[in-house]
Image (tube, rainbow, N blue to C red):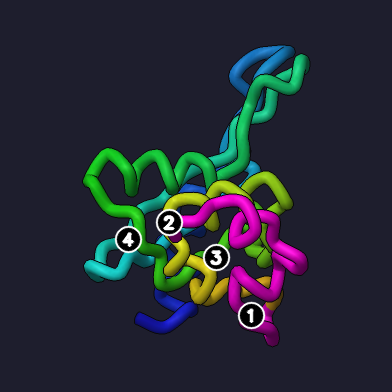
Amino acid sequence: MEFSVLKEHALAYAKHREINNFVACGSVAAAILTAEGKVHVGISIDTACSMGFCAEHGAVAEMLKHREVRIEKVIAVTDSGTIVPPCGRCRELMSQLTQENNQTQVMINEDTIVTLESLLPADWKPHVVKHW
């Protein structure tokens, strides 16, 4: 599946919505293509007290509900269609699911696709986790 198709999946859910004075959602949506060929989409949740989460976390939760852990590709877009790279917390979450996710293709802007591994220099896990 091309990133353009994956982006369309994310854009279908990237719709900013104010829930109330304290909570908004959907400013960013992320789409994950799994090794099994399935697409899972999540949206961001922003709260006044920082208890929300990124769209990638929502997409990972959807993926895990279906007992999948291997990510082939991931893309996140704002509600205006701008591609945004995953934050450090999201990078770490995806990398901890399986070592194979180090080779996940991540679109970080319209012209650039990198591996998750390249976004996590000096990764701590190979030095600590012996059974990867």
Contact, mark 1 vs mark 3 (Cβ under 8 Å): no
Sequence-first tag of 3 and 4? 4
* Residue closer to the observer: 25 or 131: 131
Point out the stretch of residues depicted in magenta: 110-132
Contact, mark 1 vs mark 4 (Cβ under 8 Å): no
Disc number placed over residue 114 in the picture, else none? 1
Disc number placed over residue 75 in the picture, else none? 3
Q: Nearer the viewer, mark 1 or mark 2?
A: 2
Percent across and percent down for residue 121 are 75, 68
Distance from the alpha carbon under mark 4 to that under mark 2: 28 Å
Contact, mark 2 vs mark 3 (Cβ under 8 Å): no
**Other-residue count near label 4 (Cα within 10 Å), few / some / many at <14 / 14–19 / ≥20:** many
- Give the side of residue 68 with respect to residue 120, left or right: left
Mark 4 lies on residue: 39
- Give the side of residue 47 with respect to residue 99, left or right: right
Sequence-first tag of 1 and 2? 1
Q: Secondary structure at mark 4?
A: strand
Q: Secondary structure at mark 1?
A: strand
In the rendered image, the vertical position of residue 63 relative to residue 46, given as above or below: below
Sequence-first tag of 2 and 3? 3
In the rendered image, the vertical position of residue 67 relative to residue 1, given as above or below: above
Disc number placed over residue 91 in the picture, else none? none
